[in-house]
Amino acid sequence: MTAEPKSPYLDVKSYRRKRLIDMARLLPIFGGVLVIFPLPFLFVNGVLTTDATPMALYLFGVWIVLILAAMIFARLLRDPATDD
Amino acid sequence: MLSFNILVLVATLYVTFLFIVAFAADRRAKAGRLGWLRSPLVYTLSLSIYTTAWTFYGAVGSAVRNGLEFFAIYLGPTLVFVGWWWVLRKLVRIGRTHRITSIADLLSSRYGKSAFLAVIVTLLAVVGSTPYIALQLQSVALSFATLATGEASGLGASDVNGTAFWLAAGLAVFTILFGTRNLDANERHHGVVTAIAVEAIVKLFALLAVGIFVVWGVAEGPSDILERVSKANINLSSTSGSRWVTLLFLSGAAIICLPRMFQVTVVENSDESHLSTASWAFPLYLFLMSLFVLPIAVVGLAELPKGANPDLFVLTLPIAHNQEGLAMLVFLGGFSSATSMVIVAAIALATMVSNHIVMPFWLYLRRSRQAVSGDVRSILLLSRRISIAAILALGYGYFRFTGGTGALASIGLIAFTGVAQILPALIGGLFWRGATRKGAIAGLCAGFFLWVYTLFLPSFGGAWLMSADVLVYGPFHIEMLRPRALFGVLDMDPLVHALIWSMGVNTLLFLVVSMVTFPTPLERLQGVQFVNVFQHSSGQGQRSSMSVATDDLLVVAQRILGSERALALFRDAALKQGKEGGLPDPTRDFVEQLERQMAGTVGAATAHAMIGQITDGATLSVEDLIAVADETAQIMEHTVQLEAKSQELAQTAQKLQHANEKLTELSIQKDGFLSQISHELRTPMTSIRAFAEILREGGSLTEDQARKYSSIILEESIRLTRLLDEILDLSVLENGQVVLKRDHGKLSELVDRAIAATSSYDNERPLKIIRDLPSEDIDLVTDLDRLSQVFINLVSNTRKYCDVAVPELEIAVRRLGDLVKMDFRDNGSGIAEKHREIVFEKFSRLSDASSAGSAGLGLAISREIMRNLGGKIEFVPGDGRTLFRVIFPIELAENSGKPMV
């Protein structure tokens, strides 16, 4: 993938793979939003709640979703072909 | 209660077990049977050194004190690993391509192999990691005491210190044994990594076991636990939104920037695809590690007496329930967490210290004896071993210095904030080609300083270097400079405050200084290679071809890589260059390859400097580039000149060819001319000779006949003479040797004269001449005789050749400024097209009619005369009639006799 001119058109497989990588790249952003987003509800003035259970369950839920998604992407993108 | 001795025995046995594991793994790797040693599982487990004793024990304590904060410490790395396509992938590729040995080496390599930058990062890493190592020693000592006596303070100070000391010493031995087996950081430490992987399993197993025991043994299952969590009044108020985000950021930055994490993630990585597995497996590991933190915290709070150290709940809960085996397992888990972290941190730091501080210093001291043989390897190994011992000694000293105080508890996040200072320069270096060395140094120094000032020193609470007085009132009582409220920023969590200031100023300086400074050529080269690492994973040239003695290179390579490996490397290179034996040529590729191999041992900056010493620093400088550019420009200029020359030559050749053709033509013409002349002379000569013979015979010739014959001879002689005159005349005219006179006269008189001179022909066929006399009233200064010769020729030609019954000649004169144009037009049938070309040629007679007495030289002579008079005569093709046009200057030029044009 050096100086050879690249065709602007990829075959469907490479195209799919590239979009999958895009999705994999989006995953941490998605995760970051999910982890930060609920904060205002929980921490307003620090007196909103003393019950840690829902928040803990929520965080565990987001966490496991992220792990599963990463696993699926890792599996789908296992073929170590050219990526860039 | 376990006796102290049993604990020591178990710990010793466990350590022995780890030694055996590491030893076996090393042997296996050496035998080439890597197999599972290089599996993604081992890689993922080795990453678990992120969870140190601080998190193993401390997560529960954190949950008790700060609610859900411990989540953030795990979620940050989760996001980084899930998003490995962004940073980690590039980092690992660069690490492998450039044979990076440490995070200091990475930054140094990226910013033009800067030695200074490496020193800063090394210092930052040592300052940040030493307390962390102390924390591990403390945690092991505390757990030891707790397990032996039931409470953390159960052992006397000397025993605690002794525990920490022997632990540090044992770890030093282990690290030196397995961490410095090979020098090349890219030859993985299989023994160490395998031992760490085993420890990772032990600590996970221990924590899960306690968790399961707590949930199903102490409590009554998950629902009971959930209920207890809800009622536990867990303190959620201490975590503000900003602190939550800060923790996420810090832990995410730490997983990239911590020297030990860099060591296992990048340096020890043997296969990029392992990262793909680790992207979900490592978060899963963290998930499992944190799964039972809340239950243990909640149950510990409920079951254990008030005032019990929540940091040790993991250990004290099983003890309280008389689960000695479980407690032992937990102890081993904590022990594993602490030791694996210390081992890897020591290796990483020792590599940095020895490569970036000791070796350059040593090279500097020995610079005059550079060529003296001696194995640098042994020096390097020694320096690395001493570094390891020194780092552990530093950790132990730090532990003793702060021992027992709570200062260590918070050191985890403080250390994270410290190493996070590397992040801007690192990320900038990976993605932004405009990042410069000066920018990185400025940002790092500022961040480092602000971190020390706002977070590190204040963490001692006024006990060390920074007095309590300064903490409260600022240095010299300048309130603006209070370490925890810089420039009047109040009411902020100290961690958030320190992070915002240090990272803010760090990033800003890095960006601004990068943008206003200019990188060196080497920096730019490295920048391109780092930023576009996926485009050209193989490095590109950075050295001009050089005159290096390969012997010198071999000497240095042997000293760094060991003689066997160096020789193999040189042999391979020689073979690749097509040499059967001997040393390879020091081509750019080869030197570069050698430098990378050496960089794997001593780091990029040092390797670059060592090779540079031999190659006379033959790196490509801007001056070199300019010189090269100049040379190119010169060559190009030269080429242009050559092209012009060759074009000239081609033109000359063409001219020569033309000349040659003309000469050949002339030669042919000359031959033709000679044969023509011979023929022309021969005809009259023949008749003269014949009649002369007849006259000599005499005999019966009448007088009439004799007179007739004599007159024929006379006529022929006259014709012959005229012919010879004409030829002579033509020759003179053609050679331009004619001498022209400058007479004054009128054109009309010249025409009159010409008509009169030819009027003898009128006897046969009268010629009607049409003239416009006023137009002929022009005063001429020219050779009138020659000019009239032309007119005579033209008029007589008309008389001779005009083939109509009543011939007419129209002479039209027009003045064109200094020129006179005369048209001689008759009413004959003109000249056939094919003959027009040759009418002016010598001996050209178009027909035999009326050709008597003409040699066909008239028009040729006329043309030459006109040429000599500075004018010309031409045949004008027109309406079928014959039209000759004569053009000549009114006044003959002074030095004429030469053609006008």
Image (spheres, rainbow, N blue to C red):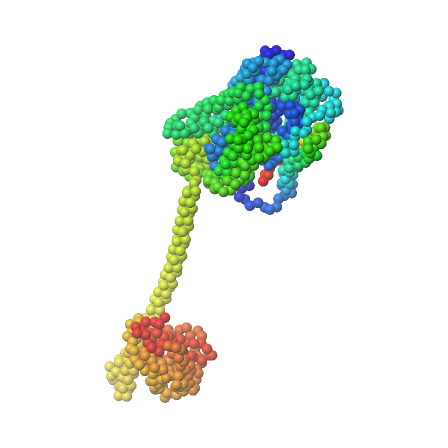
Quick one: B708 or A71, which is closer to the camera? Answer: A71
Which x, y percent locates residue B18? 57, 19
Q: Taking the image as drawn, is residue B192 in sight?
A: no
- Residue B26 or residue B665, whichever sits in front: B26
Residue B723 versus residue B455 in the image, above or below? below
Which residue is depicted at the point 45% across and 27% down?
A: B358
The quarter of the rendered structure image containing the C terminus of chain B is bottom left
Q: Percent x, y for residue B58? A: 62, 23
Q: Is residue B520 above or below residue B828?
A: above
Q: Position of residue B596 (x, y in %)?
A: 48, 33
Identify which residue is drawn at 38% across, 83% down.
B776
Q: How many numbered marks, from 0 up?
A: 0
Q: In which quarter of the image is residue B697?
A: bottom left
The quadrant in which residue B581 appears is: top left
Q: Which residue lies furthest to the front in this view?
A: B477
- Judge from the rendering whether residue B569 lies leftward or rightward of residue B721; answer left or right: right
Answer yes or no: is residue B441 visible: yes
Of B366 and B3, nearer the camera is B3
Residue at the spot 43% in from the left edge and 42% down from the top edge: B622
Front in this rendered view, residue B889 or B88: B88
* Image quarter in which the N terminus of chain B is found: top right
Name the residue rendered at 43%, 86% in the picture.
Answer: B805
